[in-house]
Amino acid sequence: MKRRAALLAVAAALVLGGAKAPEKRPEPTTFTFFVGSDSHFGYAGMLEANRSIVEQMNALPGTPYPPEIGGVVDTPRGLVFTGDTTENGTLAEFAEFEQVFGLTGKDGLLRFPVFEAIGNHDVNRESPIKEVVTRRHGGIQYAWDWFDVRMICLDMYPDDATRAWLEDELARVGPDRPVIVYFHYSLQGPYSDSWTQDEKRAFGASLAGFNVLAIFHGHWHRYGHYLWNGMPVFRPGSPKHSSRAFLVVRVRPREMDVAAWDFEKRGWIESWTVPVRR
């Protein structure tokens, strides 16, 4: 029996071309998370504005969703944050981010874990923010599981090095398991010229054939939704400008709901539902 098992393992390795088989997929489970961006600590008024955002995030569980999607907000697994934590990339500014948003849900005002990406304001003047984020999460690109969904942070944007890391990550995940990716820079529309069309085409090629549930990004400071290469893209707003919204995301077995919460008017603005392939 041992010899047969060994032969089967060798055969499987040959079929896979020596690559590792995709990781075993956990069971689908409904879960919730928040998405925020562009807190810009260090800019005038941002400490107070972000405190208000976190207070509303903490109070939101139990709040009814917009009628078109129904139900109530569950306790979130955490906050996905798409970059520009700081205005000038200083340790003092990031200390304010940590004071308000924390890391684990127990060390700041926010009661849930936070998973931040790097933004362009975070790397001004050779700032140390990338090193700080690496200490917090193990890298500036990193991934983790929320049930059967693989969450993938892609630094400021998927440049050549980050894209190579992403391709290795996707190879382990496999083509069927849902993945959610996020980073800072826009893919299209205003302020999307911070990276090249060739880089975007290469990124799209890296994602082709995989089960991308959604992409989230910041940078524009305006909440919204669009399709890019057939994939749903969502972005939150920012306390720095007039589009003051964060996102509440509910992943269900067959659908994903995304609702925008206006943290100035303290109410829902808009919601969207996209299919989930499992």
Image: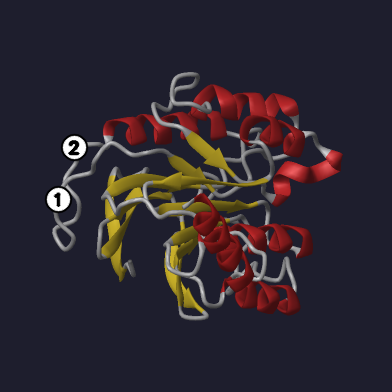
Residue linked to disc 2: 62
In the rendered image, residue 4, in percent from the top left (x then y), is placed at: 51, 59
In the image, residue 19 sits, relative to residue 71, either above or below, namely: below
In the rendered image, residue 195, in percent from the top left (x then y), is placed at: 73, 68
In the rendered image, residue 78, in percent from the top left (x then y), is placed at: 41, 38
Q: Evaluate if marks 2 and 1 touch, with contact meaning CB atoms under 8 Å apart.
A: no
Q: Amino acid at mark 2?
A: Gly
68 sits to left or right of 230: left
Looking at marks 2 and 1 on the same chain, the residue that comes earlier in the sequence is marked by 2
- Of residue 171 and residue 17, the one placed in the foreground of this image is 17
In the image, residue 127 sits, relative to residue 272, either above or below, namely: above
- Of residue 114 and residue 241, the one placed in the foreground of this image is 114
CA–CA distance in space, label 2 to label 1: 9 Å
Residue linked to disc 1: 71
Quadrant showing the C terminus: bottom left
Q: Residues within 10 Å of mark 1 (few under 14, many from 20)?
A: few
Q: Amino acid at mark 1?
A: Gly
Q: Name, please, the residue furthest toward the top.
A: 107
